Amino acid sequence: MWALQPLLRRKLQRRGREEAGYLQAIEERFGHYTQPVTEGGYVWVHAVSLGETRAAAVLLQALRAAQPGIRILLTHGTATGRAQGVSLLQDGDVQVWQPWDTPAAVQRFLTQFKPRVGIILETELWPNWVAQCNKAKVPLVLVNARMSEKSMQQAQRLAWLSRPAYQGLSAVLAQTQADAERLQTLGAKVDAVLGNLKFDAKPDAAQLTLAQTWKQKLKRPVVLFTSSREGEEVMWLDILQALKDAPLDHQDHIHAVHWLVVPRHPQRFDEVAALIEERGWHVSRRSQWTDGLDAEQQDDVNTIWLGDSLGEMALYYGLSDAALLGGSFAPLGGQNLIESTACGCPVIMGPHTFNFAEAAQLAEEAGAALRVEDMAQAVTTALQMVRFAPDENAHVQACMTFSQAHRGAAQRTAQALLPYLKTN
């Protein structure tokens, strides 16, 4: 890790050309800070990326209610996570990049901020973090923890490195029993299975209201391809072209709906727009909308909408009548479907959901999600599903029932963390 530091700098410079956020405060990643050394006492919360930061928002609300006045030290690894995390800060809180996993960088981080506890969300565990926190007597707790079968096997191949890291955690609070068992296999001390924090996240009400206002003006239902990943857009566009050339019937024709795609990674917005145009479609970008789409854009059946904004997933789900789940059509493990179902938007997922296996299974069992074999079946299933108005679509009601049934993890997690929040 020490030897790789120059490569990290090069990577950050390269990423920074696409996302300027990666060029911000680079030295923080190596444990060098412009802030004066603090008196400490922070509750360190690490949310590596956007999804974890959204989960952190729910947890922080519960933690602040359980222990008013706590000061948060919020860290991230990605530019999107850091940008989202700004909205979670209150007076006295601090936000910096996560320290690079070398003893020196982690020691400087701990000396600078003197956290009394570290709370890591989901999967982000680094060996030197654990070793140096143990040395400094800073308890580390992995919360909302998940562990796929694939990740467990990878960790087992590096057991000499991973086992001491998992054993060095003070506690683990797992999402599911299956996650707990895999984490225990790696040597972690699992205190409890508390569910998934993301079920407690409430969709942005203003965005949902705006979506409904815009939706009333639409002449056709909307099918969203959410969190699409590299390679999957090509599959999707190939199927659309095949159906355009040989429609199955009038109801299943691809022009019966508006198509909307939101790529998982914002640095790919331009790439996806170019890909769509290369295939002969027009592109209408969310960043160019003022009050939804005008009539001309709506009437153009050869236009695909591109969701090229951050922090507006509730708007996109609220507009949509069904969502194809990105990351599940290529062997990438899928994406979180909880936000979609919370907005009442049924999900159609491919065969690859190993990163969110239990949530996907529960949603499927509840009727909030449908499993298909490939992209072709996903597109035709979506076209069939949106024939019905939302109040006639049983999958929409199943979404709301499913979301309500699994809430409560934030409160349970906050209570489990309370002993670590008490002032020494």
Image: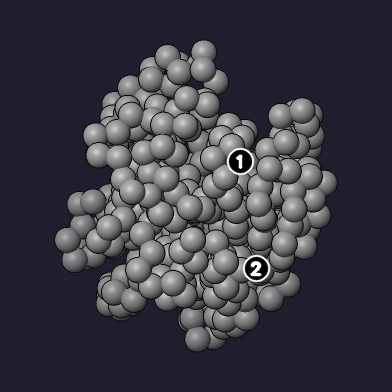
Q: Secondary structure at mark 1?
A: helix
Q: Quadrant of the N terminus?
A: top right
Number of numbered tags placed on the structure image = 2
The residue at which mark 2 appears reads as 195
- 261, above or below 365, in the image: above
- Dots 1 and 2: beta carbons under 8 Å? no
Picture residue at 48% right of the left edge, 52% below the top: 116
Is 65 or 290 nearer to us in this picture?
65
Picture residue at 49% right of the left edge, 81% below the top: 390
| The residue positioned farthest toward the front in the image shown | 424
| Residue 2 in sight here | yes
- Determine the image quadrant of residue 29: top left
- 109, above or below 412, in the image: above
| The residue positioned farthest toward the bottom in the image shown | 391
CA gap, disc 1 to disc 2?
27 Å
Give the residue type that dot 2 points to: Gly
| The residue positioned farthest toward the left in the image shown | 290
- 220, above or below 21, in the image: below
First in sequence: mark 1 vs mark 2: 1
Give the residue type that dot 1 points to: Asn
Q: Residue 43, percent across and down?
A: 44, 56
Is 280 or 115 nearer to us in this picture?
115
Picture residue at 78% right of the left edge, 45% below the top: 187
| Residue 305 in sight here | no
Is 153 or 227 nearer to us in this picture?
153
Q: Residue 320, percent across and down?
A: 43, 67
* Residue 134 - label: 1
Q: Residue 74, percent across and down?
A: 39, 50
